[in-house]
Image (cartoon, grey):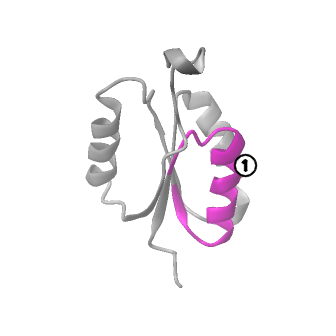
């Protein structure tokens, strides 16, 4: 499959599973839209992916903000990027005793 025009959008893309998936998708020829909270971390990851010869677009958003998802959607649409893969890797949650969560 020719993935040169397709984008994988990955949240939580600056570390852990998100970062490793970004490398895998880049190695398969997918362009990337990487989302994380910190622009500086995104810049470092994008620089590290330069060797894959794919387009890397970064978006600094904190998905804890209720408006962040729609802002990401709007930014992707404004740039007319064709996202064919979505990896929702960023997360939040409450913790404590199971009976209280």
Q: Is residue 72 above or below residue 41?
A: below
- Decide which of 49, 1 is in the foreground and name it: 1
Task: Find the residue positioned furthest to the front.
Answer: 99
Q: Residue 66, located in which quarter of the rendered image? A: top left
Across and down, in percent, residue 33 comes to 49, 51
Q: Which residues are magenta?
A: 10-32
Q: Position of residue 80 (x, y in %)?
A: 30, 59
Relative image position of residue 53 (x, y in whole percent): 64, 66
Residue 16 lies, in percent from the top left, at: 71, 41
Q: Nearer the viewer, residue 31 or 19?
A: 19
Mark 1 surroundings: few (<14), some (14-19) or many (≥20) residues within 10 A: few
Quarter where residue 86 is shown: bottom left
Residue at 69% from the left image edge and 57% from the top image edge = 23
Q: Is residue 35 magenta?
A: no
Seen at 69% across and 68% down, the residue is 27
Quickly name the residue at label 1: 48
Say what secondary structure mark 1 lies in: helix
- Return the residue nearer the eye: 94 or 29: 94
């Amino acid at each position: 499959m020719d993935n040169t025009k397709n984008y994988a959008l990955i949240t939580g893309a600056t570390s852990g599973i998100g970062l490793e998936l970004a490398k895998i998708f880049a190695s398969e020829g997918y362009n990337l839209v990487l989302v994380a909270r910190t622009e500086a971390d995104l810049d470092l990851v994008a620089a590290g992916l330069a060797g894959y010869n794919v387009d890397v677009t970064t978006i600094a958003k904190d998905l804890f903000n209720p408006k962040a998802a729609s802002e990401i959607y709007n930014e992707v649409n404004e740039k007319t990027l064709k996202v064919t893969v979505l990896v929702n890797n960023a997360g939040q949650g409450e913790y404590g005793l199971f009976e209280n969560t």
